[in-house]
Image: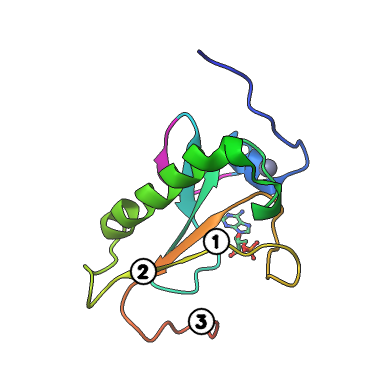
């Protein structure tokens, strides 16, 4: 059944999901959208977001458990497809910044996936 997902008209990631702001798409299905980060920290750096506007990990509830599970299951597959080297020599980093002190700049839940050969030359390697 098609149902309207909650979106925030002022949210940059909701606009990306709707195609109102361009992005370099990595993956899309009914519930999830993935796209390259505009300011990559690593040779491979993309974001996986729920299409539903959920602000952060703090607003996540039990109803989102399957969605979060799907994001985490998708991450390793997309990481390899996008050029991360195989585990264990390769691998990738998954990061979910939450709140201002957590480094979150965009208030629409997003999962960073970063990888590729080191050093990551963008100065934010911690
Ligand atoms: P965070 O600091 O965890 O909220 O991450 C937000 C990320 O979104 C940053 O890494 C930005 O580079 C990225 N970002 C912001 N605007 C865009 C955009 N229009 N397209 C792709 N990535 C973006
Ligand atoms: Zn949003």
* Residues under numbered marks 3 and 1 in contact, where contact means CB atoms less than 8 Å apart: no
N-term-proximal mark, 3 vs 2? 2
Residue name at image x 74 percent, y 72 percent: 101
Whether residue 119 sits left or right of residue 80 in the image: it is: right
Numbered disc 2: secondary structure: strand
User: Where is mark 2, residue-wise?
Assistant: 92
N-term-proximal mark, 3 vs 1? 1
User: Where is mark 1, residue-wise?
Assistant: 38
Numbered disc 1: secondary structure: loop
Q: Position of residue 85 (x, y in %)?
A: 24, 69
Whether residue 5 sits left or right of residue 27 in the image: it is: right
Residue name at image x 38 percent, y 72 percent: 43
- Measure how far apart labels 3 and 1 are at the Cα level: 13 Å
N-term-proximal mark, 2 vs 1? 1
Q: Position of residue 65 (x, y in %)?
A: 52, 41
Residue name at image x 35 percent, y 84 percent: 118
Q: Which mark is residue 122?
A: 3
Whether residue 20 sits left or right of residue 115 in the image: it is: right
The magenta-colored residue range is 22-29
Identify whether 82 is placed above or below 1.
Answer: below
Residue 44: in sight, yes or no? Answer: no
């Amino acid at each position: 059944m098609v149902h309207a997902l909650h979106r925030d008209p002022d949210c940059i990631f909701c606009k990306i999901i709707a195609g109102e702001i361009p992005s370099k798409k990595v993956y899309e299905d009914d519930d999830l959208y993935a796209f390259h980060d505009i300011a990559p920290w690593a040779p491979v750096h993309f974001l996986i977001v729920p299409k539903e506007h959920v602000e952060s990990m703090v607003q996540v509830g039990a109803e989102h458990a399957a969605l979060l599970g799907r994001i985490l299951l998708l991450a390793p597959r997309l990481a390899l497809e996008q050029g991360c080297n195989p585990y264990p020599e390769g691998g990738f980093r998954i990061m979910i910044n939450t709140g201002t002190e957590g480094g979150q700049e965009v208030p629409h839940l997003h999962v960073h996936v970063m990888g590729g050969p080191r050093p990551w030359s963008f100065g934010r390697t911690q």
